[in-house]
Amino acid sequence: MRAAGLMEAGALLYARDVKLAFRRWEQVTQPVVFFLMVTTLFPLALSPDTAQLRQVAAGVVWVAALLSALLALEFMFRSDYEDGTLEQLVLCGQPLWWLALVKAAAHWTVSGLPLVVTSPLVAASLAVPGEAQWTVVASLALGTGILSFLGSVGAGLTLGVRRGSVLLSLLVLPLAMPALIFGARAVDMAIMGDSGRGPLMLLSAMLILSVTLGPFATSAALKVSME
Amino acid sequence: MWIWFHKLASPPHFYRIAGRVIPWFGWPALLLILFGLYGGLVLAPMDYQQGEGFRIFYVHVPSAIMSMFIYSIMAVAAGIGLIWRMKLAHAVAAASAPIGAWITFCALATGSLWGKPMWGTWWAWDARLTSELILLFLYLGYIALRSSIEDPQRADRASAVLALVGVINLPIIHYSVVWWNSLHQGSTMFNPGAMSIQMKWPALVMLLGFMLYYGAVLFVRLRAEVIRRERNAAWLREELGQ
Amino acid sequence: MEALNPHGLSGRGIHVWRGDRHVLRHVSIDVLPGEVVHVAGPNGTGKTTLLRVLAGLLPAEEGTVGWRGRSIREERDEFNAQMAYLGHENALKGDLTAYENLHYSVGMRQLHDASEIEGTLDQLGILRCRDLPARVLSAGQRRRLAMSRIMLLGASLWVLDEPFTNLDVAGVELFSSLIGDHVAAGGMVTLAAHQGVVVPGATPRIVELD
């Protein structure tokens, strides 16, 4: 028996969350199915003309991914809160901000990453040219990451609140708008043949900011929700 | 000095002091706003480009500035309440949110009224208007969170965390919207920077008037907040003469 | 206000409001090594609230909780290392097996090898549940699994909220003897229960909340 260090405890928590997600496979696939379905709405609503779709593709992919990731956000702490595991995490002696960071990272792995992996399919369906695909993937990888870390604050604040999922969306969407602006812009530039590097750099900066500051706000939010 | 501050924070003292202070904010606010309106609507020279329509700027710009000012006050008060556990600070944040939300709405409404003769539509995705809209969402989210949590202490602290996260994101949101707007050739609003003092002074008077108005309404709401939180306390019954 | 006791857990002048309700009024409590303190009172008197305050989960509006003479607000990490909390909920993940539940939850604080975990499962009489997911276990087995976590943590202070819930007679005896062994070895226990508590080898000191 020996004391667990920061990395060991973090690895255990990460492994636990990923293992749990894979035992409830539906929770991983539902946001992906939602993503696919929402994207389908746009050609149905607008027109199947590829030139027209290509013009709106950047925005559609990004809005659909954002909404799908938002859907999965409320589950970050929900089950831990309900079965009492969250209390034990608060009491386990590891810094709560570190645990919040690990939880957000695990959450991204099981909900953001599947969206990123599915995105080339979605982009292709909206007539995004092949060369722009990697920008789509990169921008969504950064964007869903930002949403997991920034959104973890909202997820922590709305624990146990009635109609919490709607409230969560109201709180997180304004904060996600900058990421949407830069991410969609990057994809748009790539579709038009320019390099989307500028907006992608800004997106990376936002991700770094969310990863470094988000967990502290989340740990404050979790302590408040425990009261 | 700390004793005075602590006294101020004690509900009975605060209630009495606030009661005395309100008229000192209220009347000057009314006078300044009336004076500013007269200055802006009557005295200031007409703009050669936009004609009489631009006069709405005398209400729009002070509202926009106040909307951000109030959010900052709300966040600072929330931070003080969170760190030093001062109930009064939480009350200031709670009372400021609806005032800020309404002022933001005023800024949006006056911006929209301005836009109609200028651009022909009731709404344009101008950088400032879009920023104000997102700010309104932040205010509404704050108010929604507060009202969804039943336990008052938890509501105070949760909304404090939200206000702090919001205030840090505010510059990021603002600059990303400005950048977004610059990419697309949208119409921009009348920029108050490039103006002579002859045209500018009514706006400054209005701004000062709005600030005093905020102070007056804030104290009125705080007194109501104190009554609500202390409704079972003995001192309140004495104070209200029951 | 009295000084915080230097040997164990102490609560001084604790006030907690839940909205308008003054749930805890000026509560003071001590738990010393070798003691079992039974927080008693009818439902709704704030037993759970008091235990949560003592465990550091709920900050009291007024008053202090001390551990070995220092406020837990200052000594949070040391206090957490020495305290094990069992709440109403078992803090178990339904989709993880009994073994995995212990491995992941206790492992956040200390790493144990398989034999230690199995030994504790055996001690609590649920070794045969080792590889069963927690959601298929009975309520009593889950409570025993939750108690296994307390045993493995090796903390000196146990804060237990209604530990005997869902246990059969054998389970109640088992838990009581585990508590007795713990305090005999110098540990301390504070628990909330609305029935009487009988611990072999130690007489619980009762603190009534009204």
Image (spheres, rainbow, N blue to C red):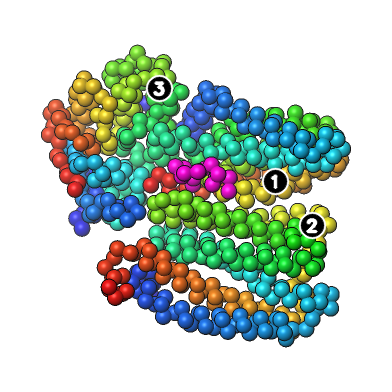
Q: What mark, if any, has residue C134 been given in the picture?
A: 3
Classify mark 3: residues with Cα within 10 Å, few (<14), some (14-19) or many (20+). many
Residue at the spot 39% in from the left edge and 35% down from the top edge: A84
In percent of width and height, residue C146 lies at 33, 27
In the rendered picture of this protein, how many numbered marks are placed on residues?
Answer: 3
Q: What mark, if any, has residue A180 been given in the picture?
A: 1
Task: Residue A146: say if magenta.
Answer: no
Q: Chain of mark 1?
A: A
Which kind of residue does numbered mark 2 sit on? Ser
- Residue A130 vertical position relative to residue B76 in the rendered view, above or below: above
- Residue B102 vertical position relative to residue A16 in the rendered view, above or below: below
Q: Is label 2 on the same chain as label 3?
A: no
In percent of width and height, residue B189 lies at 77, 66
Residue A136 is at least partly visible in this image = no
Distance of label 1 from label 2 (alpha carbons): 16 Å
Magenta-highlighted residues: A155-170
Residue reaching furthest to the bottom: B43
Q: Which residue is mark 2?
A: B182
In percent of width and height, residue C144 lies at 30, 24
From the image, which quarter does the N terminus of chain B lie in? Answer: bottom left
Q: Magenta segment, principal secondary structure?
A: helix
Q: What mark, if any, has residue C52 been given in the picture?
A: none
In percent of width and height, residue C161 lies at 28, 36
Picture quadrant of residue A32: top right
Residue at the spot 42% in from the left edge and 35% down from the top edge: A82
Distance of label 1 from label 3 (alpha carbons): 41 Å
Secondary-structure class at tag 1? helix
Residue C40 is at least partly visible in this image = yes
Classify mark 1: residues with Cα within 10 Å, few (<14), some (14-19) or many (20+). many
Which kind of residue does numbered mark 3 sit on? Ala
